[in-house]
Amino acid sequence: MSINAYRRVQEVAASPRSTEYRLMTQITSEMIAARDAGLRGVKLMPALHRNRMVWGTFANICAIPGNRLPDDLRATIISIGLWVSRYTSDVMAGRDEIDDLIDVNRAILNGLSNENGVVGQGLPPV
């Protein structure tokens, strides 16, 4: 089986939660790698931008009328998305560190892994 065929099967078979988990793992790993490489401020832009875009997308999806998530969960996701956007600006300006963004993503990954029965796959230790 070719790698492309395997990817197509994986995409069809993946649940939305496992897809979210995989995406958040990739993004969080990128931020950890950037931090561990000693990057600061604007040099963190590629990893920070991708994280900000994902959180913005999550927030926008939660704001859509008819979203079936519970209202309190939707509100929490929207609030986190807004915080990520503001805090990312502070990190890029050198006023804050990337660690809090990594911690938030890890907390979300922990919640997703508990729902999916996947524990701690893919991320280096703190």
Image (cartoon, rainbow, N blue to C red):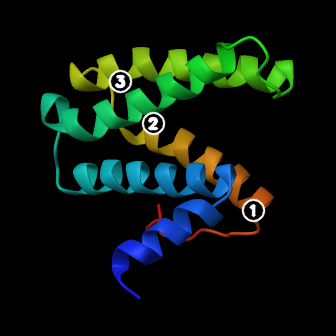
User: Which badge, 3 or 1, comes first in the chain's sequence?
Assistant: 3
Residues at badges 2 and 3 in contact (C-beta under 8 Å)? yes
124 vs 61, left or right, is left
Query: Label 1 is placed on what type of residue?
Result: Asn
Which residue corresponds to the image point at 33% horizontal and 36% vertical from the top-left?
50
Q: Nearer the viewer, residue 94 or 7?
A: 7
14 vs 35, left or right, is right
Mark 2 or mark 1, which is nearer to you? 1
Percent from the top left, x then y, of residue 41? 18, 29
Label 1 CA crowd tier, 10 Å (few <14, some 14–19, many 20+)? few
The Cα atoms of the two marked residues, 3 and 1, are separated by 28 Å
Image quadrant assignment for residue 89? top left
Q: Which residue is mark 3?
A: 88
Query: Label 3 is placed on what type of residue?
Result: Thr
> Secondary structure under badge 3?
helix
Percent from the top left, x then y, of residue 2? 35, 83
Rendered position, 47 above or below 73 = below
Image quadrant assignment for residue 119? bottom right
The Cα atoms of the two marked residues, 2 and 1, are separated by 22 Å
Percent from the top left, x then y, of residue 37? 17, 56
Rendered position, 124 above or below 21 = below
Q: Which residue is mark 1?
A: 116
The Cα atoms of the two marked residues, 2 and 3, are separated by 8 Å
Which residue corresponds to the image point at 50% horizontal and 29% vertical from the top-left?
55
User: Which badge, 2 or 3, comes first in the chain's sequence?
Assistant: 3
Q: Which residue is mark 2?
A: 101
Which residue corresponds to the image point at 57% horizontal and 54% vertical from the top-left?
19
Query: Label 2 is placed on what type of residue?
Result: Leu
Percent from the top left, x then y, of residue 66? 79, 16
